Image: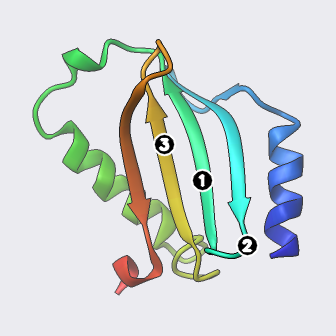
């Protein structure tokens, strides 16, 4: 847990940060009791314009990211949570990948 708490502190010192054209990470939270790392992100896009199937694709990509050879869920055995907010800071969607999703 100490490694992830150190990661949280270091990463948060660099935030906010865009990770692509529309996605801005604004905070990372680590919960050692529940073994969850949560990334809070803002989507700078009119989410009403997302086409059908985007959320399924995003969930699949989330699983691929956190279940790969160096993934948080597959290697560290922690749950990764992306809480996505609209530009007005209201909740849009939450993506969750748990270790059980990697099997």
Residue 69 is tagged as none
Task: Give the CA distance from mark 1 to mark 2.
Answer: 11 Å
Question: SS of the residue at dot 3?
Answer: strand
Question: SS of the residue at dot 2?
Answer: loop
Residue 83 is tagged as 3
Q: Position of residue 40 (x, y in %)?
A: 58, 39
State which mark lies toward you, 1 or 2. 2
Which of the image's four quarters has the C terminus?
bottom left
The residue most toward the front is 33
Task: Classify residue 80 as left or right of residue 64.
Answer: right
Give me the residue at 84% from left, 34% from top.
14
Q: Position of residue 25 (x, y in %)?
A: 63, 33
Residue contact at pointers 1 and 3, CB within 8 angstroms:
yes
Label 2: how many residues lie within 10 Å, few (<14), some (14-19) or many (20+)? Answer: few
Give me the residue at 72% from left, 60% from top.
30
Residue contact at pointers 3 and 2, CB within 8 angstroms:
no
């Amino acid at each position: 847990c100490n490694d992830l708490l150190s990661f949280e502190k270091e990463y948060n010192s660099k935030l906010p940060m865009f990770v692509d054209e529309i996605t801005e990470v604004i905070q990372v939270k680590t919960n050692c009791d529940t073994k969850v790392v949560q990334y809070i992100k803002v989507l700078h896009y009119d989410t009403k314009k997302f086409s059908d199937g985007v959320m399924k694709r995003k969930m699949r990509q989330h699983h691929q990211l956190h279940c790969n050879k160096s993934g948080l869920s597959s290697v560290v055995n922690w749950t990764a949570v992306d809480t996505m907010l609209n530009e007005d800071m209201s909740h849009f969607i939450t993506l969750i990948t748990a270790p059980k999703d990697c099997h």
